[in-house]
Image: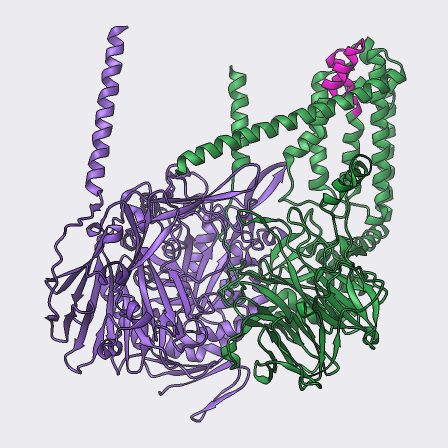
Chain colours: A green, B purple
Amino acid sequence: MKKLIRILAIVLCLLTVFSLTVSANNGGMENVSYDTYTYWNGYTNKKLIPARPMFDVDSVWSASSIGVEAFDSLKDIFVSDNGNIYLLDSTKLLVLDSNGNLKQSFTELKDSEGNTYNFENARSVYVSDNTIYISDGTNAQVLLADETGNVFKKILMPASTLIPEDLMFCPTAVTTGLNNDIYVLSEGCFYGAMLFDKDYNFKGFFGANTVVSSVGDFFSNLWDNFFTTDEQRAGKIQKIPYQFTDICTDSDGFVWTSTGVITRWKAQQGQIKCYSPSGVNILKVNSVAKNMSSASFDFSDAGLASDGTLFRVQDFVGIDIDKNGFIYAVDKTYGKVFIYDSDCNALNIFGGGVANGVQEGTFTSASGIAVDDNKIYVIDSSLNTVTVFNKTEYGELVFKADNLTLDGDHEKAAEYWHQVLNMDRNSQVAYRGIAKSLIISENYSEALEYARLGNDKENYSTAFFYVRNEWIMNNFAWLLAVAVAVIALIVALGILKKKKGKIIIKSEGIKNMLIASFKPFVSANNLKYKHQYSTVFGIVILVLYYFTYVSKTLLGGFLHTSFDADTFNSILLLLGSVGVVVLWVICNWAMCVAVSGKSNIKETFAVACCAVVPQVVYNILFIILSNILVIDESGVLTIIMVISMILSFIILCVGTMIINEFDFFKFIGTGIATLIAMAVVIFLCFMLFILFQQVASFVTTVFNEVYYR
Amino acid sequence: MKKYTNKIFALVISLAVVLSTTGCAEKQATADKPYNAEADINMLDSGLVCENDNYTLSWDSEVNCVILTAKSTGEAWSSIPYDYYSAGAFQGKAGVAMQSPLDISYYTKGVNQIKKLTGYMGAVRKGRVASEKTQNGIKVTYYFDEVEIAVPVYYTLNNNSVSVSIIPSEIEEHDNKICEVSLSPYFCAVANSADNYLFVPSGSGALMYTDARGDARLYEEKVYGADLAQQVYEKFENRQTVRMSAFGAAGNNTGMLGIITDGAESASILAESGNEAVGYSNVYAKFLVRSYNISQVEYSGNEKVKNFWAFADKISPADRYTVTYYPLGQDNANYSSMADIYREYLADKYGMTEKSTDSLLNLEIIGGAFVKKFMLGIPYYSVEKATSIKEAEGIIKELSDKTSSINARLLGFGLSGVNAGKVAGGYKLSSALGNKSQLNSLNAFCKDKGIDLYFDYDILSYNDSGNGFSKNNDCIRTVNGYKANQNIFSISLRNIDETKPQYFILNRKGVNDAAEKLAKKALVDSISLSNIGSAVYSDFSEYEYYNCNGMINTVVDITKLLKENEKTVSFDSANDYAAAVADNITNAPVVSSKDNALDIDIPFYQMVFKGSVSLSNTAINYGVDKQTQFLKAVESGVGLTYSLTENHNNELMETQMSCFVDSLYSNNKSSIIKYVDDYSELFEKVKSAKVSEHIILNQDVRKTVFDNGVTVLVNYGESDYIADGFTVPKCSFTFTEGR
């Protein structure tokens, strides 16, 4: 009874610790009606961190502030090379200066034959070389007009065998690239952009999103091929690539695209792409990994929020690239503006409104974005406003510093990065930029500090390599002396022990379990036939295993671990370490007994614990070595891990064979059966858990129904 | 056996009787008034109702309008805009809108919907309006037969104002239950014109120009912020709370200031400007007379959420809801005069002091945050140090060499740092940040230097039991009877951040007890109270506290109690009632919510409280642009505020609190010194002055005149401002000692 009370007390204490909760009195940038943040890389998931705004609302333009008749529905905005802002509404096309003053206004365009073209179905505007391109949507044409509004060319649906018969020509966006090629996005066209040369000849389709198939899709297709009729196959929903939502070109003539909602049920990826002239996506992500294709990178906020009926998924509807190659994208669902650099580091994310924005910088239906030197223009097709964001002092510094870093001028960049940090201690790119510059100036110890603060393993590894080597060089003499002394001490102790017959460990059981790693056969025989094992010591080994397993993450070297307090779950780690061993013991004993094995559960447990000893040693070595080795040397850790795994397997194999009096093949058989049994048990536990969850959910629902009614 | 059975039976019966009679007593005492369909409709004839030395109050029974006339000048104001009323052409949409002296909303049981009904459509048009004289005014009852609701409205003439009131307990209803009442929507209105404006108290205050451009521009905001007993599932916007219960309209030599003098805790302020169909722009108050709550219930399996509406069983317990209207004539139809009148009102009602001196430098030093740590894989929470007491002393000492005019506030030095933990941070100093002797040493240093040192306590939000407060029993309840959990919202998706723990709100009795304990246990004599002075909440476990009722009294009583115990009290982002009784206000708002409907921000809050209560704005280093934030302080003559920490690390960063973005002292030191140097000369002249006039010279330039004659011109623009011999450099300021 006393024991029970003690256990209860411990459980209660633990529960108190686990249930301790906090809540934040969140501060904020006081003048802003929305949050600004960035992502930190290097954690299990990308982590949202508040950031100082790089842009601030300068003004909000409306029809009345511009001095024109009310807008019907704003469609698009474009900033030309000469700084003119083209604002397309379904009733007019306006040309404004950067302060929102009206320079020119068109209610229709005319061609030389006197035909007029209004903007009712127009979808986008683009200007290049004094030519205005209007994507005339359902009128199936792209109008090319000069600056006075005279239409001199119409691009219509080309006659080409490359174009599928069922494709409708409904231009939604236009841009021009290298060699004055014209790229046209057409609604419903999943083959990429339609590419025309400077003489308006159709050259083919350019770039396209691809369908990502899962293993499930493969099997589903296989099934369909064998077991379904043509009619059934025709009736199935086909996976087709998602069409681009916007297109633009950068100052080098490369074509950039944005893609909107890809899936509503899971995190998205590949929303932004940059295409080479041959139509290959060349945008690489260097923020979370080296040279990862942007097709595998999620540019939106991680996580999904439900609006009650559907998941509210971020929807990139507009993209623009500034002259320095920084990427700007606008999300319609949440009304957010995302700024990335060309390495796909998220610099700043701001805006909001979630389709209900009534405050400055928030949106009801953000539908287009354009940038010039210092400003971002975002149109809201529901509020019929243009929100002008001005670059802040902080934004100016970040752009300068990041540009210099991307250009390789790290030393000069460091000056700006320091200023950035002075204004925002949460800037990961700043820490990384400074660390890089310090490495170049060979100030490795300081570089270590900044790399660590910036969660930057690459630069940390480089700096650590030099710091470590220098330390070893400086301390080689006494390190050698200590090593010799330790070896001498061990040898001396060994000799002394032999001569004097001193016994350090008295328990034969413990001794036998410890020698299993060196003499698995001897140990297993002693275990079986001399009963030399200790269940208590086995438990100690398991406890040690758990703590070293956890400590691997908590105390392991920065370069070889990725600890994230938000996702770190000690319960899962307990199940993944001790839980697996215990499950093995139960299942293996049951399987062995079923095939006339001679072991009892205590022996099976002891063997399993002996097999865990190499893992404990590996964990301890990992903790020590991961604090010494750099990333390039992580192979050492892998080798130790493999050795420990092999050792564990041998101990398990030999031990199980001997205690059950099995041959090797019988061990393999029972081993496989054990693994299957473990899978079944896990599955059943999982099912029970789900069942319990559903019952709980059902009870809660019933309770809520009764309570709320 | 039989003996026992009889005894148990008798006991059960007795208990049942006792319980049922208790329930009946309570029910009877608070029962809502039934609708009387047979009530007599007596109408008072048009004409003079009452008068005093300054004004006459008249009634026009034709259009149900009260008219206030100044005896000395003959100027008149009425519940229908006077020029419209005197023109007498009540037609179209304008006619309907103007003849609605009140609007109501109500719900029908079983229907998850709140419906609206204007006074004109529901009562006036059908002639269902009764009126009778009262001692200093008139009582007008509007019968909404269609929905069986009757609302009596009292118009009372005061010395220099007229009050419009409703008494919730006098409202009659039947099956349909009244929810909200909008009072005299056009008493505070001006004609649409670019020269006229509405004043709304969003954040520091804002103006809405009333010219007709595009669609009508709408503004609505709950006074003192949302009721914390409401369940919130998503937070899409960062809004500046309405901290003042005043609103106004001015232009064309006439205007009106409205002050919600009773029941501001339950009110919202609404404004509509530039409505072409009506031709007038108006601002008014709406009162919540019956609380309701929309709960989201998630159904398992299909990811669907269903909304459930829950309505309070009883009407508001408030004695009355009143808006008092102060007429503004040709001499004072501007927002500067509105601030003067409002200041006088607060002085009368709460005894706001007449004189106070601000500090040039106001330091908010953050101790630490509660972060998750692990010991051998077992998680625990502890305070991560941002600044220790010793380090705080170092910061204050260093800056005291630059200026002697300093006010310091230690924030987040309790047992849970800046996070909610035990009530009032356990009334203790976190051992991770220092010990009591270090705090005493800092306190002694500050006293010696004449520095006010405030120690911040949160006696409102908590998430851990202790010191006699239970997180299950002492927290407020929602309309549904659930614990009113407070959530942290994701900064990206704006839904509840499940990774961040919830916290709770201490009920009224708990708050009073917490304040009593604080009076005895406070570590220093100057107490800063965060949250309690800036929040209002109901507690639906006690009828007395429905509809946020009595919140003002709670805060005023707490302050009185602390002052009686010789404590100095500072409130953070204080609502007007808290500000009026405080010795110091920190984090005064400097911007509005920046709604698209609002045209320009004004420092109305500073105009009201500057010179009466020691005041400081939100921290300069929290502003997007420090120079702009600095100029905001200069514009209203208040001290400079910085929020500082000595340390920064990734653990603090991962708390996702923006207060750690730019709070490092070493980063801010140079800017503090620069701004102190730039501002000290002017500040010395205005530190005790009141703002007597504030003028918007153009989009970027503001002129502030203080009551001692000092005039400050602030230029927020990117080009120099030159006028009347003055040159105000871009992004800078200049001042003179004459007007």
* Residue B100 seen by the camera: yes
Which of the 4 image quadrants contains residue A182? bottom right
Q: Is residue A28 above or below residue A620?
A: below
Residue lying farthest to the bottom in this orientation: B725
Which of the 4 image quadrants contains residue A250? bottom right
Q: Is residue B88 above or below residue A588?
A: below
Q: Is residue A141 above or below residue A10?
A: below
* Residue A416 seen by the camera: no
Which of the 4 image quadrants contains residue B74? bottom left
Residue B597 in picture, x, y percent from top left: 44, 70
Residue A687 in picture, x, y percent from top left: 64, 27
- Side of B222 where B659 appears, left or right: right
Q: Which residues are magenta?
A: A584-611
**Nearest the eye: B226 or B418:** B226
- Side of A317 where B405 appears, left or right: left
Q: Residue at x 67, y 58 (%)?
A: A260
Q: How many marks?
A: 0
